[in-house]
Image: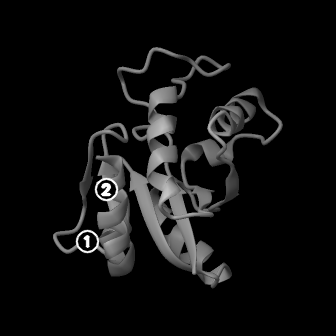
């Protein structure tokens, strides 16, 4: 069984209250939120982290992307991949990623926006809406078990 976390950055690992900045000056990442993410992922063993955030559009050799990788690395986390969608088609991008990676049979989505997720019932059931990872709630009235387990681990 393979588990993946589809991860947005802005609104999940940072919020408007974040004071640390990335090298470019954009809002940085709160270490306390990465620590909480690490805690939640422990129960899923060898979880793949797939970047869905617009941070995926950055050059991989750029300062901000390197900053993201190093912040995750401080807690033993690393990115396994990224979706290739544009900003508003995030659900479609995750669907495509899942089609290309049939080994993923369990997953959760952390995002602060609903985008097109409601067009994909299985995604909607696994979407956890955030205002910072510590403020997470179900998108669906009938969440998938993975979403329930992940939310419990954050609490």
Residue 151 badge: 2
Q: Residue 123 versus residue 71: which sits nearer the camera? A: 71
Mark 1 vs mark 2, CA separation in Å: 10 Å
Residue 2 badge: none
Residue 93 visible in rendering: no
Q: Earlier in the sequence, mark 1 or mark 2?
A: 1
Crowd tier of the residue under label 2, counting other residues whose Cα lies within 10 Å: few below 14, some 14–19, many 20 or above: some
Label 2: which secondary element: helix
Query: What residue is shown at x 63% (from left), y 85% (from top)?
Result: 102
Query: What residue is shown at x 42% (from left), y 54% (from top)?
Result: 110
Label 1: which secondary element: loop
Residue 119 placed where, x, y %? 34, 75
Residue 7 placed where, x, y %? 51, 53
Using the image, determine if residue 62 lies above or below residue 96: above
Quarter of the figure with residue 104: bottom right
Using the image, determine if residue 31 lies above or below residue 99: above
Query: What residue is shown at x 31% (from left), y 52% (from top)?
Result: 129
Q: Residue 155 versus residue 82: which sits nearer the camera? A: 155
Quarter containing the N terminus: bottom right
């Amino acid at each position: 069984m393979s588990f993946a976390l589809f991860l947005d950055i802005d609104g999940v690992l940072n919020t408007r209250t974040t004071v640390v900045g990335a090298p470019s000056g954009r809002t940085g990442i709160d270490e306390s939120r990465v620590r909480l993410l690490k805690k939640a992922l422990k129960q899923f063993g060898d979880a793949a982290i797939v970047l869905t955030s617009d941070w995926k559009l950055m050059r991989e050799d750029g300062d901000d992307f390197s900053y993201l990788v190093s912040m995750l690395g401080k807690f033993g986390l690393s990115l396994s991949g990224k979706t290739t969608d544009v900003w508003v088609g995030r659900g479609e991008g995750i669907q495509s990623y899942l089609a290309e990676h049939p080994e993923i049979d369990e997953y959760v989505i952390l995002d602060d926006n609903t985008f097109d997720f409601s067009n994909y019932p299985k995604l909607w059931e696994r979407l956890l809406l955030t205002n910072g990872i510590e403020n997470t709630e179900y998108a669906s009235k009938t969440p998938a078990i993975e979403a329930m387990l992940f939310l419990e681990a954050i609490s």
